[in-house]
Image (tube, coloured by chain):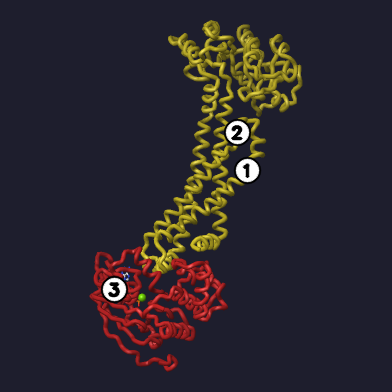
Chain colours: A yellow, B red
Amino acid sequence: MPIKLMLRNVLAHPLRALLTIGSVMVAVFLITLLHAAVAGLDATLQQASANRLLVQSAVSLFVDLPLSYQQKIAAVKGVEAICKWQWFGGRYEQDKGGFFAQFGVDHDTFLLSYPEIEIAEGSAAGFTTERTACIVGCDLAAKYGWKLDQTVPIAGTIFQRTDGKPWEFVIRAIYRSSKTSIDQNTMYFHYDYLRESLETGGARGPEGVGVYMLRVLPSTDTLQLASAVDALFENGPQRVQTTTEAEFNRQFVSMLGDVPGLLKLIGSAVLFAIFFAVLNTMIMAGRERTRDSGVLKALGFGNLVVGGMLVFEGLLVCGLGAIAGAAVVKLLEAPFQAILSARLPGFAFSTQSLLLGCGLAMLIGLVSGIVPGLRVARLTTVQALREVD
Amino acid sequence: MNQPADIEIRHVTKCYSRGGQTLRVLDELDMQMAGGTFYALMGPSGSGKTTLLNLVGGLDTADQGEVVIAGENIAQLSSGQLARWRANNVGFVFQGFNLLPVLTARENVELPLLLAPINRRQRRAQAERALELVGLSDRMNHKPSELSGGQEQRVAIARAIATAPSVILADEPTGDLDRVTADQVLELLQLLNQQLKKTILMVTHDPRAASFADKIVHLDKGKLGRIDDNPTRPATAGR
Ligand SMILES: Nc1ncnc2c1ncn2[C@@H]1O[C@H](COP(=O)(O)OP(=O)(O)OP(=O)(O)O)[C@@H](O)[C@H]1O
Ligand SMILES: [Mg+2]
């Protein structure tokens, strides 16, 4: 019957109970979602290739490396192939407001180094044999309605042609990517086209290389190789930092801000807000029932029972919220996965994070019940009975 | 049925400290009340009536002295022991009824029986018998909000007698009731005293309510004035 009494107390304010259960439900769902996002992000970064290293300036990604480094790096034992990456930063003439990335790369090693790139239309040879050729991602081509063999005018920003005209690239291949390490929204063209234009005075801009990508021979110690490369330029002219692709990606993501940290912060903020909401509700409930508690004590019920009823009430409300949250997670699992699987292939609701969410909800219920429960348990019968409501 | 329980107060002192000052509400009070008698406790406001009632009912503990009910000195019990003692030996009736609003009349009466070693069916039967006694058999499934003040107080009395305690303590039980319903409640208390031999101690300001009792105790400034036989008992009481 104390259980019946507790249930009746909860049901006496159905709207309040529903709102509390609802907020706990939202919290449990959000915790699970954020957890899945963090895990997804991590898994996505982990998809990076283990046999590719990236060499960048030790100062910053935005500082170019000298062209002359290529030969020295290529000579290091264990390097199978080397490929330059240079950020172009141009604007598509037909869509000045839009943005997509363009990179100048070494046409002869690029496709070999990235086996996840699959040619969907055109051919690899079409791309490699023509100086002004480019290869574009299928999503990008679809966005602008580009066709094979079409010429795309790109206005330079960092690299500007001296005749004032836009650069022109011919689409000789359209690619798909089987991994997230390469997205389907980028244009790649010949680095040599850029370099020759700069050397002949056809264009102005910085000479140098953003990043060198190294493809590592099988059964090579990548860490040792990385430090060997770093050691090459220890005394300048420019020091370098060599990292695995996974580490590089992680640094790149963290340049946008500490995304996982931000997600965790949001999760904690939500938890705190819900905690105070539930705590407030339970304290209110405890106050309203002070006199009832006094009556129960006068009838001979112990402090433990009287206080425990509030603790169980907190647990009950949060437990119902957790169950509702779990139901929402199960319900939305499939649609969320469908939407996010393209961007975050590692994204998945895990039972573990759902259990974590439910556990935190129960903890909130416990603490929110203990606070008012302790109060009524400690009040003397006479004090509790004197309370006017 | 239990033996009528005597109530004995020996040198009881109770103080409250407020704002650094100590207020001696009961001052070495001595008092004897015979079992099976209906007492009305009267006195000016602030004279310590409620304080005394709480001590007798084991809701509060005295600073000094002994409170002996049916031969047991409850001043020596711990708070847990006191709670158990209350469940078995006293029934309370309050001015504000103090029913739990979310429970029906029968569930309210069943509440103290939860602490008794009986099963569900016995509990239910005992609660229904108590409600029958107070004349509310037809209101068992009503919530307090669906009852009149007089009916609520009768449910509270049913709750007080459900565990068959030998002592009933009532603090201004008719304070919130009109005259007619007050009379019904007082007659009910009288009945419990006469037929079930309950020892009743009822605080009241109302001489008319006091006239239902056998004896009237006068309390003034924490000191016992006198105990009178009630000269004005209405003929209806039939004594
Ligand atoms: N918890 C407390 N703390 C401090 N003082 C208290 C406390 N309880 C009661 N008092 C004081 O003790 C005195 C006696 O209180 P008590 O409630 O026993 O009086 P009473 O005779 O029942 O009065 P009334 O007829 O107004 O109900 C009063 O002066 C009251 O202010
Ligand atoms: Mg009083």
Q: CA distance from mark 3 to mark 1?
A: 63 Å
Q: CA distance from mark 2 to mark 1?
A: 15 Å
Please give the residue where the numbered disc 3 appears in the rendered image. Answer: B67
In front of the other: A10 or A303: A303
Dots 3 and 1 on the same chain? no
3 or 2: mark nearer the eye:
3
Which structural element holds mark 3? strand
Estimate the x, y position of residue B11 in percent, counting from the top left: 23, 75
Q: Residue at x 43, y 9 (%)?
A: A235
Above or below, A257 against B17 in this view is above
Question: Disc count in the image?
Answer: 3
Residue A383 in the figure: left or right of residue B148: left
Which structural element holds mark 2? loop
Estimate the x, y position of residue A52 in percent, counting from the top left: 57, 16
In the picture, the disc for residue A347 is 2
Residue A103 in the figure: left or right of residue B113: right
Identify the image quadrant of residue A326. Answer: top right
Question: In the rendered structure, which amino acid carries the disc numbered 3?
Answer: Val
Please give the residue where the numbered disc 1 appears in the rendered image. Answer: A330
In front of the other: A339 or B19: A339
Question: In the rendered structure, which amino acid carries the disc numbered 2?
Answer: Phe
Residues marked 3 and 1 touching at CB (< 8 Å): no
